[in-house]
């Protein structure tokens, strides 16, 4: 997995919650993209570290999960 640091903080990114996330809580993730990097975080605890991967790495992950 290739990951590169971003110059933006997590608060400066435009985050989008998973369409599978319900209003009742549970396991939720949010993603944001900037400069060829996709950032992933836990929507319930935003103080945790953000996972950052390349667009190619994110696309490979999506392809993998769509097959399973």
Image (cartoon, rainbow, N blue to C red):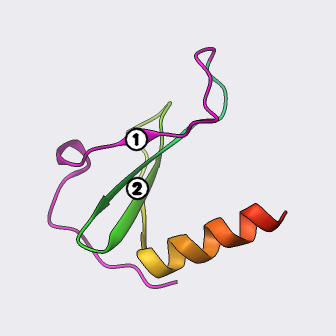
Q: Which residues are magenta?
A: 1-24
Quarter of the image with the C terminus in it: bottom right
Determine whether 29 is above or below 51 in the image. Answer: above
User: What is the number of callouts on the image?
Assistant: 2
The residues bearing labels 2 and 1 have C-alpha atoms spaced at a distance of 14 Å
- Give the SS element for disc 2: loop
Q: Residues within 10 Å of mark 1 (few under 14, many from 20)?
A: few
Apparent side of residue 17 relative to residue 22 in the rendered image (left or right): left
Q: Quadrant of residue 16?
A: top left
In magenta stretch: residue 23: yes
Q: Residues within 10 Å of mark 2 (few under 14, many from 20)?
A: some
Determine whether 4 is above or below 6 in the image. Answer: below
Q: Earlier in the sequence, mark 2 or mark 1?
A: 1
Q: Residue 26: x, y in percent?
A: 66, 26
Residue bearing mark 2: 50
Residue at x 52%, y 70% (from the top left corner)? 58
Residue placed most toward the observer, 19 or 1: 19
Residue at x 73%, y 63% (from the top left corner)? 65
Q: Nearer the viewer, mark 2 or mark 1?
A: 1
Residue bearing mark 1: 16
- Give the SS element for disc 1: strand
Residue at x 14%, y 66% (from the top left corner)? 7
Apparent side of residue 23 relative to residue 65 in the rendered image (left or right): left
Residue furthest out toward the bottom: 2
Magenta segment, prevailing SS (helix, strand or loop): loop
């Amino acid at each position: 997995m290739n990951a590169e640091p971003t110059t933006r903080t997590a608060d400066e990114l435009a985050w989008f919650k998973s369409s599978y996330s319900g209003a009742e809580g549970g396991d939720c993730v949010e993603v944001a993209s900037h400069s060829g990097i996709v950032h992933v975080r836990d929507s319930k605890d935003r103080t945790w570290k953000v996972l950052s991967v390349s667009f190619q790495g994110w696309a490979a992950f999506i392809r993998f999960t769509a097959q399973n």
